[in-house]
Amino acid sequence: MKIVLLIEDDPTLRENTAELLRFSNYEVSTASNGKKGLELANNNIPDIIICDIMMPELNGYAVLEALAESDQTKHIPFIFLSAMTERKDVRKGMNLGADDYITKPFSEEELISAIESRLAKAAILKDARENREGADETEVKKLNDLNNLFVSNGKFFSFKKDSIIYREGQNSNYIYLINKGVVKCCKSSEHGKELITALHKKDDIFGYGSFTENEVQGETATVIKETELLGIFKNELANLLTNNHKVTFELIQLLTDDLKGVKDQLLQMAYSSVHKKTAKTILKFAEKLNPKPDDPIMISRNDLASVAGIATETLIRTMSNFKRQGLIEIEGRNIKILNLNKLQDIC
């Protein structure tokens, strides 16, 4: 049974909402203010949190920000439940990282649908994280010696968020290992549009175009989360590799894996249409929600777009096409699946 943490200072609304959730087969824990809610979330990790905004002790915005700072709570789906209906209030809540914003008064169907959709999305993203982490662990083991080379010989650099490490067209001097943080690499099109080429995280090596030639950088590297780097001059790294064949082979393997990743990305771009991505994502939600035969599934369009990795506007156009084909019905903010078999054929 999934655990819902309900944080609401109005006692009548808190009890009525908790009863509604229990009737829908959820285990419910409640808190009368943000401070108590945060304590409950940390002591007994819930599957999803529903939270008011204007509360004593600690408001809903502060609760969400505190949860985002902890590794054990940052991935919990979070829904604001508030009487604050102004567009700026909704935008503020969503910009802080909330998964949804439901305004009071709300219907039972609206609340349950939002919870089911967010739980399904969280399960899909959890699967993706676990697959990524398993692959990352294997990669780190393979590259320990190469990492140690940077630790022993590299120069330390520290960058704050949004700092530029190097720009496209600048001289290429260092090759970097990320000790902490996240770095985004991108190129600019002839029309000035930014194209992201890679996102690098801890233990990734980047900044290499050539290990021997003095060429300029082909992309811009920007810090998107406070970052620490270890950098080695290209010619110095070449000398170190000459005397350490084991590390050289590790580097060759790293470059081979990078090349394979680029090829896979190009193939996906060439062959995976928006229709396929959308249909595949719907099927993922269907699997997680596990409906009874003939029961419709209700999914938020924002959740679908976010998991599929496409723009919401593009998703809406695709959904309109699916609707014309009789695959789905669209009712307000939710989507009902009518024909799973045809969606499977699209994939």
Image (tube, rainbow, N blue to C red):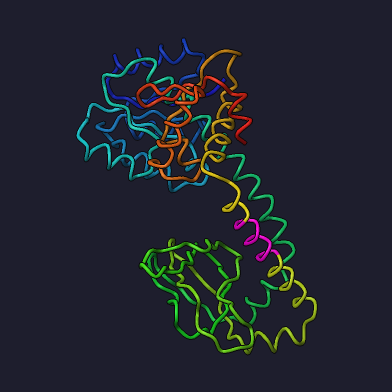
Quarter assignment of residue 126: top right
Q: Is residue 260 within the magenta segment? A: yes
Q: Nearer the viewer, residue 290 or 319?
A: 319
Looking at the image, residue 305 sits to the left or right of residue 255; the answer is left
Which quadrant of the rendered structure holds the C terminus? top right
Residue placed furthest toward the left: 86
Residue placed furthest toward the front: 325
Image x and y of residue 87, in percent:
22, 37
Which quadrant of the rendered structure holds the N terminus? top right
Which portion, as a residue range, is magenta?
257-266
Image x and y of residue 241, in percent:
72, 83
Which residue is at 51% across, 34% downward?
121
Q: Is residue 246 within the magenta segment? A: no
* Residue 84 against residue 23 in the figure, above or below: below
Which residue is at 61% across, 49% downward?
271
Image x and y of residue 148, in percent:
68, 74
**Magenta segment main secondary structure:** helix
Which residue is at 28% across, 33% downward?
53
